[in-house]
Amino acid sequence: MERRRVKLPRHEYGKSEYRPSKEYRLYMRQHRKPYGWYEKLAHLSGKFLKIDPGKKEKERLESAIMFTGLRVKAEEVMSLFIMNIVFFALISVSVLTSAYLVAGQITMINLIAMMGIIMLGALVGYYFYRYPINKVKILRIQASSQAVLAILYMVISMRISPNLERALYFAASNISGALAWDMRQLIWDIEMGKYYSAHVALDSYIEKWKTENEEFAESLRLIRESETQISTRSKTILDEAINIILEGTQTRMKHYAQDLKLPVMVIHMMGIVLPVLGTVMTPLVAVFMSNMVTPLHLIVGYNIVLPIILIWFINMALSKRPITSSRIDTRHHPLIPPRGTMLVGKRALPVLPFAIIATLLLLILPINFFMQYPEILLSGQNVMAEGVVVMQHDIGSLLMSMMVVLSVAVGLSIYWILSNFQKIKIEEKIQKTEDEFGLALFQLGNKISSGAPIEVAIEKGIEDIKDLEISNLFRIVLRNIRMLGMTFEQAFYHPEAGALRYYPSAMIKNIIYVITDTAKKGVSYASESMLRVANYLKNIKTTQEYIRDLLEDTSSSMKFQAYLLTPLITGLIVAMAQTIMKVLVTLGTYIDGLGIAGEMGLLDMQNMFINLETSMSPELFQMSIGFYLVEVIVILGIFLTKISKGDNKTFQWYTTGKLLIIAIIIYLFVALGSSVMFTDIINQALSGLGILT
């Protein structure tokens, strides 16, 4: 037989029509991204020191590293842990040595600072060491919300065509987050020949997820087995796969919510309540221990160290919160202003100038006052000129310092409220639509299953849900189909007139895509998809309500503290500090005037009660406590919204802005009112004793 010669076309370099697949582009984008901060630190530590963590711990770390995709080694993680402790130990020794060289002695404050630095180093080192393991937990929680959708989409695909590879591709294309990347990498491994079939690839994938999410792994196993079964048996197995993932995920989320309740209460009490109550002692510390505890110690402790520790613990606790709501992306909504702006008519005005102007207007008086009398802020002494008191610590100077805190709080509140109040109205409508979406799908699915065309089913469905917000979404769809001649898919996804442009919910978008895709195979498939998705949404809503009820007591307590308790306590503390200092200064001046100081061998009787040169002034003390209040309210606002709404930035900053402006007003009224009241009472008491004339 004569061999045929095949002439290949000449390759013209630079004119290749090769286009990499979407999976390859996504895969390479994920793996070519720059090293993260943790990976950089681990690599740097590994260059200086290599420590074997031990066989058992090494296996544990390597398992976590492989699951998370971190590009580090177990030895580098251990090296980072040790190097961090050594680094902080060197800092503590350096601080102690410097204090000894400067002061010639080592005080108790120096030793406490040294121990604090070492403890901080141990905590940071432990965080670095546990980072891969903690990230596994976070990814598992993030994946749990998408795992249900992944199984749902795979089941829908297998119902239409029993092809595992197609089902994997369909699910990976319609979910998001860490699980989407994971499934896309699996598809890429199949295409590259690492696994010769999707059936074999799922064996490895199930083994990977078995320890992290058992119900997800079991559902995948059932879907894989359904491929080889007869039609009726296959449908039963696929139904069981959905039931397992729904029930398992709901149980897992309930357990997470129960486990979250205790850390939330601990953070609430140990991180917010006790420090606020502890500020009751700060006036006495500021007055009587001014030689040991300087204003810098109080400012650093309350305004820097405590908020950082609080934020760290809050992030650790909230990282375990189950994700039960979809992301709402309103960036392309036609009625949403750009970030940092608000709509006035049809014009978007930047909000930042309004916030800056309000801050500067409130700062004019206090800046002028403290530039004229800087001593009133820096020490507890009255301002003297030629032996005459020209300015003393009174309600007026305290009010000037309060205006500094007020200016910052008002500026932040104006920016957060004005830049989000229009967004939040639209997001609330979208959120309400999401809550009603399951009911609408159930109605629509039932009408389509009875044989009605999609257009007629939508029209009848609107009548049944006409009082709900979701009806407006389907009115836009029906208008697009009838008046603009669009298909069912175009009525949702058209870039200018599509219904999803006005309701930009990731959940609704993905579900509608699945329904429109299955509708191409037949209306019966679309009806079945709607009913299954409706059941899924019902379970998710039940879980959301359960979590909300479980954390309601803690959330209510934190709201009460943010709105009333914290500003009330801090306002009273500021008034107490001013009153204590006024009493001690008055007593010292009175006794000094009696001549008793000379008889007792004292040059200045005032210093027997208080060292005015080193003590913190009431104005500076007020600023420290006031800014601490601002920080606590911001932290509480973020904490509250993350518990109730998840990572929704619009609700987060809008709620924080409202909390802040209300709390700071209550704080100012309480502080000023208490100062006036305490001053009158003390003046009357001292006058009755003949100390004041």
Image: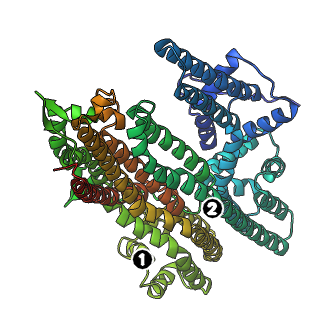
Residue furthest to the front in view is 599
- Relative depth, front residue between 424 and 22: 424
Report the residue marked by disc 2. Answer: 261
Q: Secondary structure at mark 2?
A: helix
The location of residue 271, given as percent across then percent down, is 53, 50
Q: How many marks?
A: 2
Q: Residues within 10 Å of mark 2 (few under 14, many from 20)?
A: some
What's the residue at 42%, 61% (across, down)? Answer: 565
What's the residue at 22%, 31% (across, down)? Answer: 375
Residue furthest to the right in view is 1
What's the residue at 53%, 46% (across, down)? Answer: 310
The location of residue 260, given as percent across then percent down, is 64, 59
In the rendered image, the vertical position of residue 398 relative to residue 233, given as above or below: above
The location of residue 677, given as percent across then percent down, is 26, 60
**Is residue 582 toward the left or the right of residue 537 in the image?**
left
Q: Kindly report which numbered mark, 2 or 1, lies closer to the viewer in this rendering.
A: 2
**Is residue 221 toward the left or the right of residue 117 in the image?**
right
**Is residue 498 toward the left or the right of residue 592 in the image?**
right
- Relative depth, front residue between 228 and 246: 246
Instruction: Kindly identify the amino acid type of the residue bearing the numbered disc 1.
Output: Glu
Q: Quadrant of residue 525?
A: bottom right
Instruction: Kindly identify the amino acid type of the residue bearing the numbered disc 2.
Output: Lys
Report the residue marked by disc 1. Answer: 469
Tell me if label 2 and label 1 are in contact, CB under 8 Å.
no
In the rendered image, the vertical position of residue 54 relative to residue 517, given as above or below: above
The N terminus, quarter of image: top right
